[in-house]
Every structure is written in structure tokens, then in C-alpha cells.
């Protein structure tokens, strides 16, 4: 469908909602196959949790009225999907997690061809479901994001959080290791690995070593300084950021503390960031 000026129009008709009551216990037991992988992808490239059936992502949306209403949207599939994504981000920032999830799901209904946009939508659905503590709705979207991008940092992190909730620690650790393979200094995943079931204090050693290596790279830029340093890990509760702070005998531009983005600790809202 298009207007006289050839600007595309998209028609959407929401299905009429049935009258069957939402059975949360039955739905919690439902599973579905993981998303199919692209041709040529090797099995060892696929995370362990994506090699078996996944919980069905089927939240209770009975509060949302659907009457088979026709809706017309102006723009291409990518443009309309982006509008819904931005609307979802506004809801998310306002801590309206349910409305945010619906907006991201609406965006996917238009099947955008932009694969990066589609990945972000799945990631944001997983983020909203984490805030709602609707864990079946985390693994499935994370798996779809990873299918689109094997280096989807946030997808591995969010999948690992859900797997820890389900006490599937081997698969959670697998997600952590896959992320660290291409992002070895990722503070969020190293914080997550402080969980005793995933290795506990091992992550603290890894964080210190990561900081030491990062600082060594800085010092290689200038050979005029030869300093002995001791690296400590700090967490700023005001900003929710973690950083590594070296104790040095003198301070130069090359010795400033390295700051890294971090997910806030438990109890600080929101616990996920958007794109």
C-alpha cells in the first residue's frame, strides 16, 4: 500500500483475543525449539543452552485489549519498527517494563530487514523481561539475538542471568566464557562470575589480571616511566560504575584510572541498559 507521493503505508490488524484464561503453570512447562542457525554454522559455535528446547516466551498480556482493529502506519518496515523501538525505550526509561516489552514486540511484528535493529529489539525484550523477572522471556529472545550475531555481548550476559535463575550453571558459565573470548575485559560478565556456582573468587583474579594487562598497554606508549603499581578494584555506588585504580608513585596522563561501563548491582534499577 502506498500514498500518491509513493510513501509506503503498512496495514496491521491485531488478532481478536480469545476468552481462554491464562494458565501460568501450564505455560511455564511449555517449550519450543531454539531458533534455526544460519547455514554453515558449526555446532561448537552455538552456545550450550541453544542446543536444546527453550522455555516458551508467552507472557500474560490479557490486560491489553485486542479487537481486530485495523491500523495504518506510514513508512517502511524498518522505519515503523524503529519508531516502536524508540517508543519502547521511552517506556523503559520510565520503568514501564510491560509497555516497553509490548512496544518492542510490536516492532518485530513488522519484520524489519535491518538485522542490527532486529537484534536490538530481541535484546531489549530480554532486558524488559529481566526487570519483570519473567525468565522464560529472557532465554528465547537472547537466543534469537545470538543467532543474528555470535558476538552479541548483551545477549550472552542476559542469557547467563536467566540460566543462573534456572540453576543451569554449566550453560551459564558457557555463555560467560563465550563472551570473554571476544570481550575479555567485560566488567558485567566478570561481576556475574562472582557467583560461587560459576567460580566465585576466580573472577576477582581475572579482573585484576585484566586491569594489569590493560594498564601495561598504556605504559608501552611511553617508555619514560618505570613505575611499580598495585591494582585494586573499586565500585562507585553513586554512578553504578566499576573501575580499576592503580596505586602509583606519581600521576601522569598515562596513569589515570581506567573506567569501564558496568551493570548496576542487584537492587539498583534498572539492571539492564538499552540500545
Image (spheres, rainbow, N blue to C red):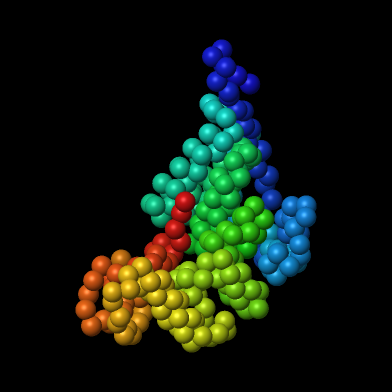
Vertical relation: 261 (above or below) 74: below
For the point 54% across and 28% down, the residue is 75
| Residue 49 point in image, percent of width and height | 69, 68
Res. 217 image quadrant: bottom left
Vertical relation: 53 (above or below) 177: above
- Single out the residue that lies furthest toward the front: 224
Left/right of residue 172 with respect to residue 51 in the rendered view: left
| Residue 271 point in image, percent of width and height | 44, 64
On-image quarter of the N terminus: top right
Vertical relation: 17 (above or below) 258: above
Vertical relation: 116 (above or below) 209: above
- Single out the residue that lies furthest toward the top: 4
Left/right of residue 132 with respect to residue 36 in the rendered view: left
Q: Looking at the image, how many numbered discs can be counted on the residues? A: 0
Task: Identify which residue, 13 or 79, lies in the foreground.
Answer: 79
| Residue 79 point in image, percent of width and height | 53, 34
Res. 146 image quadrant: bottom right
| Residue 135 point in image, percent of width and height | 59, 65
Q: Is residue 275 visible?
A: yes
Q: Is residue 161 visible?
A: no
Task: Identify which residue, 143 or 248, lies in the foreground.
Answer: 248
For the point 76% across and 65% down, the residue is 43
Res. 44 image quadrant: bottom right
Left/right of residue 105 with respect to residue 190 in the rendered view: right
For the point 46% across and 54% down, the residue is 274
For the point 58% across and 23% down, the residue is 8
Task: Identify which residue, 60 or 88, lies in the foreground.
Answer: 88
Amino acid at each position: 500500500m502506498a500514498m500518491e507521493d509513493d510513501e509506503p503505508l503498512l496495514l496491521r490488524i491485531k488478532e481478536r483475543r480469545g476468552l481462554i484464561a491464562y494458565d501460568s503453570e501450564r505455560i511455564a512447562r511449555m517449550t519450543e525449539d531454539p531458533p534455526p542457525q544460519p547455514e554453515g554454522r558449526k555446532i561448537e559455535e552455538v552456545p550450550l543452552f541453544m542446543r536444546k528446547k527453550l522455555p516458551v516466551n508467552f507472557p500474560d498480556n490479557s490486560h491489553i485489549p485486542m479487537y481486530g482493529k485495523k491500523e495504518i502506519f506510514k513508512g517502511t518496515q524498518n522505519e515503523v519498527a524503529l519508531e516502536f523501538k524508540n517508543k519502547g525505550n521511552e517506556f523503559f526509561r520510565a520503568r514501564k517494563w510491560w509497555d516497553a516489552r509490548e512496544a518492542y514486540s510490536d516492532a518485530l511484528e513488522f519484520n524489519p530487514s535491518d538485522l542490527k535493529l532486529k537484534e536490538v529489539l530481541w535484546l531489549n525484550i530480554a532486558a524488559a523481561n529481566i526487570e519483570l523477572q519473567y525468565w522464560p522471556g529472557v532465554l528465547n529472545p537472547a537466543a534469537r539475538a545470538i543467532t543474528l550475531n555470535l558476538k552479541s555481548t548483551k545477549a550472552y550476559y542476559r542469557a547467563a542471568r536467566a540460566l543462573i535463575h534456572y540453576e543451569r550453571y554449566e550453560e551459564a558459565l558457557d555463555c560467560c566464557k563465550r563472551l570473554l573470548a571476544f570481550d575479555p575485559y567485560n566488567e558485567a560478565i566478570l561481576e556475574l562470575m562472582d557467583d560461587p556456582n560459576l567460580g566465585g573468587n576466580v573472577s576477582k583474579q581475572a579482573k585484576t589480571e585484566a586491569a594489569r594487562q590493560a594498564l601495561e598497554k598504556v605504559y608501552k606508549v611511553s617508555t619514560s616511566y618505570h613505575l611499580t603499581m598495585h591494582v585494586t578494584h573499586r565500585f562507585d555506588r553513586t554512578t553504578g560504575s566499576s573501575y580499576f585504580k592503580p596505586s602509583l608513585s606519581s600521576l601522569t596522563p598515562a596513569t589515570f584510572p581506567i573506567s569501564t561501563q558496568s551493570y548496576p548491582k542487584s537492587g539498583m534499577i534498572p539492571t539492564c541498559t538499552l540500545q
